[in-house]
Image (spheres, grey):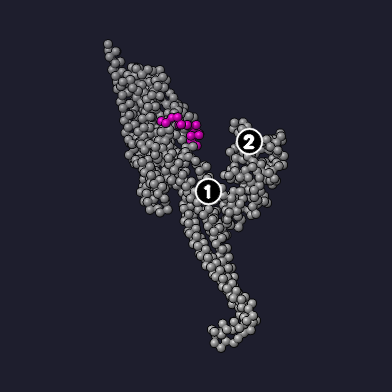
Amino acid sequence: MIIGVFELTDGNIVTASKDGSLRFWNPRLSVCYSTIEAKIDNFDSIQFFANQKQLAISEPEGISIFRFSGDQVVQLKGQKKPLNSLCQLSSGNWLTWSEGENPTLWSDSGQSLKRFNFNFSFENGFIEKVAEQQLLIKNANEQVSLWQNDGTRIDSHVNSAEVSDLFAALSKALTQVELHIEKQPTINHYPHLRNFIGSNESKSFLVPARELESQKLNFDNDAKQKEIWDFFNRPIPRELTTAMKREVKAARSAEKVLNHKIETAQEALEVHKKKRGFNKIISLVMLFLTLVVAGVGAVLCTEANAPDLFNQLAGDYVSGFRPLKLDVVMIICAGAAGLPLLLCLIFFMKNRSQKTLQLLETGNLTILNALLPEYCLLIDKVKAHRAQLWKSVPLRKNRNLYSGESVNATIQSIIENEIEKQALHSCGLEKEDVIYSNHEAIVLSDWALIQSDERRAPALTKLRGENEFSFWGDKNGSLVFAVQYIQFIFLTADKIDLFTGFYDFINKELSGKSSKSFFYKDVTTVNKDDVERQTGIGKKTISAIDVNLVVSSGDKIRLTILTQDSLRSIVEAAKDNEEKERVSNHSILKALEARKKSILEDTDMDEEEREEELDDIETQIKSMDKDNAALDSEISTNKAEEAIKNIRHQLKLHKQERNEELVS
């Protein structure tokens, strides 16, 4: 019998049964992927924790901690109160928080090591120094102290709002950096551009990890397909170089403050040491004088003729000296010894006071020196993550990637081999049946998105709208589209065979296939029509040309191609967004020199970071070094003109042959 159900943040379900077992379910697959056997009285005895893949179960012997996989990690022996929070340290030890109790430190075997005599926050009250296996803790009074992972106190800083703020800033930055890296572990988790329009719509931006998962794409064993993906979906360099930039800037600022405070504390420590040494010497000198005077007094007091000796000595130096009796001599000796003794005590107390201040300053230095390397490690962590991202930038491995030369060759190979084979097979032809130009087909292709709704209808369920918006210019000034509408026109002896289809070069999918045959005698006209198409880029339509081959039945061979005006319209769409989004080629290039200058003048950067930033600029220049205004539609237009010319020529030949047959 189920006594409770709990939904996890990842959408999975946990059910608790009366037999004491917990089962973890994937509701999408309707499968149980793990089971925990525990002593569960009721559902309230189970505690789940935010953003953690583990839970706690209250049992008679203590609280047991389990992973979602079903493995028991540890049992905290003797812990009765339910846990509000818990954290496993790198050493394997545990920190736990319960209502009404101060935090408790446990060994990895579940033995209580220490219950702190003060409270501190689970969210931002402690920082683990992993390498040293130590804990920096800020208590409720804002005092920062340093502890061993076994609960032994090392030292603490005097209450200081500035040090407390530095601790809080470090804790926040560490959390943000860890969360950032967890959510964006690879370059595929950062925004990319799928075209140079750069609007704030999903038509221009994508996050590859989501797209790859959604389309079930994997290029691990297909380098050519990976190259196509990298050509069409490009990382935005500034997203990589500015990743966690705010945290790094804050860390560098904190470094300066800490270094200044450490220097000040060291100077103060030296002052206390010197004062303590001085007070110690004076105290010892006064003690020596006290002992000397006391010794002389003791000698005088024990001699029978002490007054006579004293009077004789005093009379030798003081004229008109009146002889004194024994009791007066003793008082004088005691007074002479008391003054250096008093001074000895005064300087001894000053020595102790300086020692106390010295110990406090030593504690301050200990905490400051514990905080400083954590800021350095934070910066190093961000730098290492950025370096890993930059090593993954495709353009760094292939500087000619965005020229389009290799990608165009791959696309052409797919068209001429894979798709043409399907086209010939679908039309029931052999290559030798084609009479045009060494048995070649006339191949026309253009952007899938500008084809008529009638043409697109059969393929709509399979066309990936995201991929259709992936397009870039190549070094020749042509636009290269990830999804194209492709026509194979086979001119045979007595007819025209036509194969059409939409091909997605990203996921290698051919959809909306169609094949038809038209006898030359049935062809009535071959012409071009100006049309307008709505692409979804902005709110404007763009101009295009329909190439039509019309037959007597009224059917048409139709392909829509972009014109120079339509390419110019696409370029203008990019320019309209450049000031707002600052991602178009023009705006990025415009900002590069200013950025380069600021990098060279930035004194906070180390040389490694400066080199990385400057290399980033060179990468951006390489990726954005073409002016979109240079895009040219003549290539596709010329192909269309050539196709019309050759079809008309073949029609003319067929007509002449027909007439000759009739005459004969």
Give percent across and percent down for residue 450. Answer: 41, 33
Residue 118 place in picture, x, y as percent: 64, 54
Q: Amino acid at mark 1?
A: Leu
Q: How many marks?
A: 2
Which element is circle 2 on? loop
Q: Quadrant of residue 418?
A: top left
Q: Which image quadrant for residue 1?
A: top right
Residue 434 position by quadrant: top left
**Is residue 354 among the parts visible in the rendering?**
yes
Say above or below: 238 vs 460: below
Q: Residue furthest top?
A: 664
Residue matched to label 2: 70
Q: What crowding class fits label 2: few (fewer than 14 Cα within 10 Å), some (14-19), or many (20 or more)? A: some
Asked if residue 61 is positioned above or below residue 490 in the image, the reply reads below
Q: Is residue 329 magenta?
A: no
Instruction: Pick whichever, 370 or 58, lies toward us.
Output: 370
Q: Which residue is mark 1?
A: 174
* Residue 306 circle label: none
Q: What residue is at 48 percent from the left and 54 percent from the top?
A: 255
For label 1, the SS is: helix
Identified by mark 2, the residue type is Gly
Q: Earlier in the sequence, mark 1 or mark 2?
A: 2
Image side of residue 624 versus residue 321, left or right = left
**Which residue is found at the position 54% from the left and 54% from the top?**
167
Task: Where is residue 236? Give x, y as percent.
Answer: 42, 42
Q: Toward the viewer: 413 or 338?
A: 338
Which quadrant, please, contains the C terminus?
A: top left
Q: Residues within 10 Å of mark 1 (few under 14, many from 20)?
A: many
Q: As rendered, which of 428 and 370 lies closer to the eye? A: 370
- The magenta region covers 210-224
